[in-house]
Amino acid sequence: MIMSSIADRNLQSLPVRVDFEVIASLVKPSTRVLDIGCGDGTLLELLITKRGIDGRGVELSQQGVDQCLAKGLSVIQGDVDKDLVYYPDDGFDYVILSQTLQTTHNPRKILGELLRIGRRAVVSMPNFGYWRVRASLLFGGRMPVTKELSYSWYDTPNIHFCTIADFLDMACEIGATVEEAVVLNRKGQRVAFRLPWNTLNLFGQQAVFLLRR
Amino acid sequence: MHPDSAVAFFGDNQPLQLDSGIVLSSFQIAYQTYGTLNADKSNAILICHPLTCDQHVANPHPVTGKPGWWENLVGPGSIVDTQRYFVICSNVIGGCLGSTGPASVNPQTRKAYALDFPVITIGDMVCAQAMLVDRLGIDTLFSIIGGSMGGMQVLQWASFCKERVFSAVILASSARHSAQNIAFGEIGRQAVMADPDWQDGWYIEAGTNPRKGLAVARMTAHITYLSGATLHRKFGRNLQERSQITFGFDADFQIESYLRHQGVTFVERFDANSYLYLTRAMDYFDLAAEHGGRLANAFSKTGTRFFVASFSSDWLFPTRESRIIVHALNAAGASVSFAEFETDKGHDAFLLNEPVMFSAVNGFLQSAARARGLEK
């Protein structure tokens, strides 16, 4: 499973990974950052260049690891579902999980781990409550295969889809505080934050959350 | 002894305090260097050799005439570019190619040490190397690179001489020898010691050489360096220069002939007692044990940049051993990269032409060189 390509394919309608720009805006400069599912290291490079962070990555695919190493990034080949337990408490200021939570076996446990390893967690995720997804299921009567979610149900790596509302419930359950939330529409533009959550949950194609313990 | 290599002598004024408690009051280290040390002495790379290799990492071997054992990695224009870096490779203490070992002359008896040679450890090897690096006037090594037993030395360096190691590459290695590896080591040693020509260790004085025992040790070890898949791919059940089995104990199968050849050629270049001492040093290696049982403590406050790699079909130093190192480095907050390379070539893969590994090592070294301010 190649996390970067999953994320890219999930978001293939967008010109660049717009969530990266949002994530970069949420990370304070000169901090220690762990990027889980770092793919080819694009986000880490962005954070190092723009925010001067001390960054580390975790990536499962050989290709992604090779690309990170070629860029001179610190990257560990590993599996998000298995390897997070080996990271010490408070090892990082931020732990980032971009477009990967829905591919993990136990998202609730993973979110807990993120907030154990890092003082803050940044999570970006596709929103299954997006109206096009809802419409696809409602009118098509089949599991949604949209531009944004391009896998068939039987071969998808996205095994734990959730909506923005679902995610917020889970964050609340584990006692995490949502410091910031950025909801993006299909064009990668920010949806006005002042709208009520159920509206954001309908019009947001993806969301980026900044959480703390 | 080997005029091809430079030799650093250390006399009574610079004894080597061994982990066993014994003091080696005079000894020598044979080494090769390649390239030129730059003005601020920041471009030195130390290569640590595995069990049965030696200091001839990038030049033809003086005994066998074969190319250097890591010439695909080290050389002019290669990844460890000898036009850019000053590369040092020394024969470990206890070895048999110019450094003091059991076949060397004991100054007190004027005969070969044989079993009077003290048991040495990976830590002792590194102490001796550090003395050589001092002698060469180098404070901080830009990088230390090693696989297998060489990787153990790199870990030891990175733990005990933290401030002297800018970056470290550890391939197909482990922070401790596993029970399985100790078991294989013991088979090798028992094979040597069971050979009557071993003469209770005093074969040099007796004018014999336990060739058969050492050859069997090598044959066993050689199997552990490969994978079942490689053996099958290379040899299968093919017969050796015959069309049918002979109903005897001649080398009917190609694999038998191959292993016999490996054994016979090995004894021409390796000392049997040296083999006992070096395998013992690997058995005794347990870096965590030296740090209260917690490997992360071995790397606390390290500033070294690490690259750890394993090979998927390596059953001698399997990936889980490398992961233990990586988890400890993570827990210590170290800068570490790790990759497991897919290959069917087993443990030996780290010595072979593995393009994916090379590109990873290259990426790591290039970025470390930038961080060190080494311009190309």
Image (cartoon, helix red, strand yellow):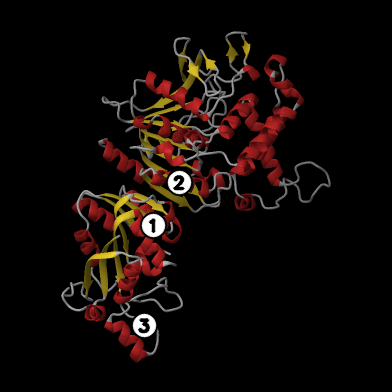
Q: How many marks?
A: 3
Chain holding disc 1: A
Q: CA distance from mark 3 to mark 2?
A: 41 Å
State the SS at label 3.
Answer: loop
Whether pointer 3 and pointer 2 mark residues with C-beta atoms closer than 8 Å, the reply is no
Q: Which amino acid, by three-letter code, is at mark 1?
A: Glu
Q: Which amino acid, by three-letter code, is at mark 2?
A: Ala
State the SS at label 2.
Answer: strand
Whether pointer 1 and pointer 2 mark residues with C-beta atoms closer than 8 Å, the reply is no
Task: Assess disc 1: are there few (<14), some (14-19) or many (≥20) residues with their C-alpha within 10 Å of its C-alpha.
Answer: many
Q: CA distance from mark 3 to mark 1?
A: 28 Å
Task: Assess disc 3: are there few (<14), some (14-19) or many (≥20) residues with their C-alpha within 10 Å of its C-alpha.
Answer: many
Q: Which amino acid, by three-letter code, is at mark 3?
A: Pro
Front-lying residue, A213 or A21: A213
Front-lying residue, A194 or B347: A194
Q: Tell me the tag on residue A59.
A: 1
Q: Is residue B249 left or right of residue B208?
A: right
Furthest residue in direction right, as rendered: B247
**Residue at image mark 2:** B309
Whether pointer 3 and pointer 1 mark residues with C-beta atoms closer than 8 Å, the reply is no
Q: Is residue A93 visible?
A: yes
Chain holding disc 3: A
